[in-house]
Image (cartoon, grey):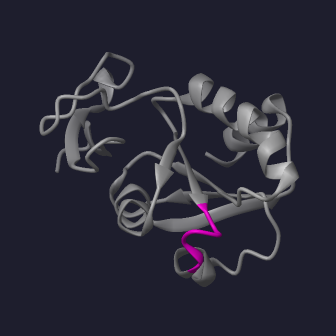
Amino acid sequence: MPEDSLHIVCPHCHTTNRVQRAQLSAHLDCGSCHQPLFIGEPVQLDAESFARQVGRNQIPVVVDFWAPWCGPCRQMAPGFAQAAKQLEPYVRFAKLDTEAYPHVAQPFNIRSIPTMVVFKGGDEVQRISGALPPGDIVRWVQSVV
């Protein structure tokens, strides 16, 4: 694959799309479902979409491991969404409900929530636990990617 193109996974149908790096900031649609490739908000993941989003995207993916009963998780959610809006299309933001998909979170030894993990090329590169305000989320992600 040429270095000027990237694989981007659709947030809707989770199909892998090849896009030109120079066109990332343009409005791009999925070749399969024709929905936007970047939606400016976190993608809700399940077991299958987690594997695709984390493993196939060639942009960094920040996953918020959270649970519905977690007060700090709910408190951080709007800031996480704000960070997604600010940093897309160069970073994909996603959320995984550890209550609904414990088998997906278990291999990552998530000990407290919320925990944000940055993945590049399917590999974990860094994590941080605890609720952060939007500006701190953006600064942390930018320092990692």
- Would residue 23 be found to the left or right of residue 31 on screen? right
**In this picture, is 124 found above or below 34?**
below
How many marks on residues? 0
Where's residue 116, x and y in %? 70, 56
Where residue 115 sits, quadrant-wise, is: bottom right
Where's residue 125, x and y in %? 62, 63
Residue drawn at x 54%, y 72% as measured from the top left: 101
Viewer-proximal residue among 2 and 23: 23
Residue drawn at x 83%, y 36% as measured from the top left: 136
Where's residue 52, x and y in %? 34, 61
Q: Main secondary structure of the magenta part?
A: loop
> Which residue is situated farthest in the front direction here?
69
Viewer-proximal residue among 99 and 3: 99
In the image, is residue 98 part of the stretch drawn in magenta?
yes
> Which residue is situated farthest in the left direction here?
32
In the image, is residue 51 part of the stretch drawn in magenta?
no
- Would residue 64 be found to the left or right of residue 25 on screen? right
- Would residue 60 be found to the left or right of residue 17 on screen? right
Where's residue 2, x and y in %? 18, 45
**In this picture, is 10 found above or below 108?**
above
Viewer-proximal residue among 126 and 51: 51
> Which residue is situated farthest in the top direction here?
26
In the rendered view of the protein, which quadrant contains the C terminus?
top right
Residue drawn at x 69%, y 37% as measured from the top left: 80
- Would residue 59 be found to the left or right of residue 142 on screen? left
**First to last magenta residue range:** 97-102
